[in-house]
Each structure stands twice: as C-alpha cells, then as structure tokens.
Amino acid sequence: MNIMKLMKQAQSMQKDMERVQAELAGKRVDFSSGGGMVTAVATGDGSIVEIRIDPKVIDPSDKELLEDMVLAAVDGAIKKSRAMAAAEMKQVTAGMGLPPGMMGM
C-alpha cells in the first residue's frame, strides 16, 4: 500500500472520529431500574446528565433499595452509552482493517 494513500486515509479517519465524538456528546441514552422507578440518562461520551426518581420509591426506612436502583440505572446507562459509542466508532474505522480496540476512545 502506498504510504501517502495510507496517511490520507488516517487523516480522513481522524476527522471522522472527531466528528463522531462531537455527535456522540449530543446523543442520549437512558436506562431504567426498579421497573422504571429510577432512570439514568447518559450522553454518548459517557457523561450522566440526568437521574429521574419516582417519588413512590423514596422510603427513608429503605434507602439501600433506592441506592441500589440508582446504581443499577447509572451502570446500565453508562454501558449503553459505551455500546453506542463503540458501534459508531466501528463504522468509522471499518475500512482501515485495524484490530478491534486499536482506535478506542
């Protein structure tokens, strides 16, 4: 393969990756736990931007249950966010023949 062609492909891929990363920051995913009683919302870059808690689940005598539901919702939202980001980045790097994880975020 011609080194100049490879360099142009790498530059193009870098621009595409930067564009996708910027787009991911604006995309949102959510994950609920406790039958929808607690929901965490994450952006495509993995930031948690919102947590919603149904008032019915707030019981001062059982705060551990609420803590577990919040933890499960946040964990699920982050995992969903990472999966979305990986899928989008895979599209950008697909034509380069790179091993998985080589161009990770």
Image (cartoon, rainbow, N blue to C red):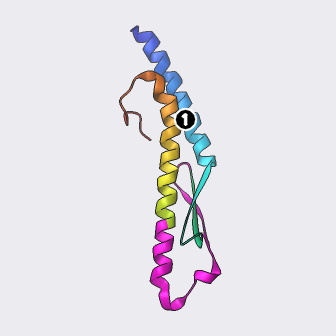
* Range of residues picked out in magenta: 44-72
Name the residue carrying label 1.
18
| Residue at image point 57% right, 37% down | 20
Dot 1, how many residues are within 10 Å of its Cα: few (below 14), some (14-19), or many (20+)? few
In the current view of this chain or complex, which residue is farthest to the top? 2
Instruction: State left or right for residue 69 relative to residue 102.
Output: right
Residue reaching furthest front?
Answer: 35
Label 1 is placed on what type of residue? Glu
* Quadrant housing the C terminus: top left
Q: Position of residue 34 (x, y in %)?
A: 53, 72
Quarter of the view holding residue 48: bottom right
x and y percentages locating residue 67 in the rendered image: 47, 77
Measuring 48% from the left and 34% from the top, which residue is drawn there?
90
The residue positioned 49% from the left and 60% from the top of the image is 76
Q: Is residue 28 above or below residue 15?
A: below
- Give the secondary structure at mark 1: helix
Quadrant the N terminus occupies: top left
Give the vertical position of 74 relative to 87 (above or below).
Answer: below
